[in-house]
Amino acid sequence: MDYWRNSAIWFQNTTNDLYNRGGKLRKFVFLIFFVLIFVAGCSQVGGMHNKGLEKSISSVLEKKSVMEIDITPLTDFDWDKAYLITPYTDEETINKQLRVKFKDPTNIGYRDDIYLLVFLDKNKVVQYVEIPTKYGQLMHGNKDGFTPSNAIIKIQKN
């Protein structure tokens, strides 16, 4: 019982001491908060989520007659390789396929509602897009990804 009482007294004295310092404690808490926000902001997933390209791809895929799509004319950024990641692909498999470390922000390993299209430039992930599976089954014949000169994705409509 004395242990807990002594611990409580120590804690109370310590917090009172910190509170009495006032300005220093606030500065310390602010500094810790700033550092945590900075670290969280720096945890790059390895590329930018390109919602504009997603909209462009979706508008093309919404047309019933479309059976394939050429990605190259829709992109406005530099890339030299792209990979189509299928639903339920885990992050380890994605990293092996891309041959670079990519922290998957979409959790596609647990999802069946999207494909993930990841663009690389000079072995760095630069952009990625989510493509809903509602448009059909997307296919690209080459497991080694595709290049701007051969960026055709075939669509098998549902």
Image (tube, rainbow, N blue to C red):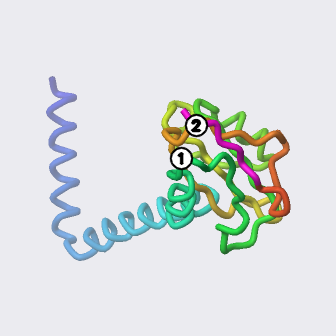
The reply to whether the magenta stretch includes residue 153 is: yes
Identify the disc placed on residue 64: 1
Give the prevailing secondary structure in the magenta stretch: strand
Identified at 39% across, 69% down, the residue is 34
**Residue 106 horizontal/vertical position (percent):** 52, 45
Q: Tell me where the magenta segment starts and ends, as one range.
A: 152-158
Label 2: how many residues lie within 10 Å, few (<14), some (14-19) or many (20+)? some
Identified at 64% across, 58% down, the residue is 46
Q: Are marks 1 and 2 in contact (CB under 8 Å)?
A: yes
Kind of residue at disc 1: Lys
The quadrant in which the N terminus is found is top left
Q: Between disc 1 and disc 2, whose residue precedes?
A: 1
In the image shown, does 100 or 12 lie closer to the viewer?
Answer: 100
Tell me if 148 is positioned left or right of 92 in this view: right
Kind of residue at disc 2: Lys
Looking at the rendered structure, the number of numbered marks drawn on it comes to: 2
Identify the disc placed on residue 157: 2
Tell me if 119 is positioned left or right of 3 in this view: right
Measured along the vertical axis of the image, is residue 60 above or below residue 158?
Answer: below
